[in-house]
Amino acid sequence: MKRATQKRTTASKRPRFVAGKPPALEHALETSLTLNGARVTRRIPARQHLIDFLREELGLTGSHVSCEHGVCGTCTVRVDGRIVRGCLMLAVQADGRRVDTIEGLSDSGELAELQEAFHRRNALQCGFCTPGMLITAQDLVTNQPDASRERIREHLSGNYCRCTGYQAIVDAIEDVLAARRKKT
């Protein structure tokens, strides 16, 4: 009899799962980050991915969700100056960090050269991959100003495009690199 009582006591301490309600173990954490230059503080569920937080909670839908495994590049954002896959990073990991989205980078004018080159070279078609491509291209243009055509392709290899065949995208990035070289 004693053993049965112990089992019931242990079982009663387990979280109860009720259909339609989140499990009792879900925790939200106070998180503060600098988003596109503005301070944002929210209580964020511990397991929510950065891309979902940006899209669903803040309405920043420029970066897309596709594979949710970090291989397609549509969810690319910049965290503390480095490109990351928003589907692989938890939003609470951005606490105390600077996050830049396609909206912020575009509004600031930082992507203007690349946007113009993409337009001129017809390096976009459906546009689904374009935000991730632009952020990745900006990373390359900033950090590898002498990149070869082969290096451009290698740097873009984590971003999928099903429409353009990449030729025009590589041409656009090469144009921006060449124009910047002429200025120096």
Image (cartoon, helix red, strand yellow):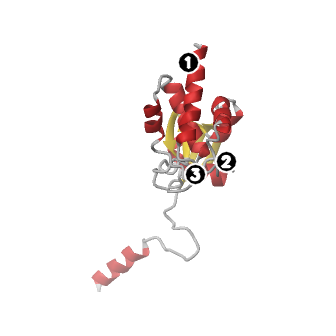
Front residue of this view, candidates 43 and 154: 154
Pointer 3 residue: 163
Q: Is residue 154 left or right of residue 102?
A: left
At horizontal 61% and vertical 47% (from top left) the residue drawn is 63
State which tag comes first along the sequence, 3 or 1: 3
Image x and y of residue 158, in percent: 46, 44
Residue 124 x/y as whole percent: 63, 45
Question: Which element is circle 3 on?
Answer: loop
Q: Secondary structure at mark 1?
A: helix
Which of labels 2 and 3 is toward the front?
A: 3
172 versus 183 height, above or below: below
Quarter placement of the N terminus: bottom left
The amino acid at mark 2 is Leu
Point out residue 140 in the picture as x, y percentages from the top left corner. Answer: 51, 31
Q: Amino acid at mark 1?
A: Arg
> In the displayed image of the protein, which residue is found farthest to the bottom?
1
Q: Residue furthest right?
A: 107
Task: Name the residue rendered at 57%, 43% in the picture.
Answer: 132
- Contact between marks 1 and 2 (CB within 8 A): the answer is no
Q: Earlier in the sequence, mark 2 or mark 3?
A: 2
Label 2 Cα crowd, 10 Å radius (few <14 / some 14-19 / many 20+): some
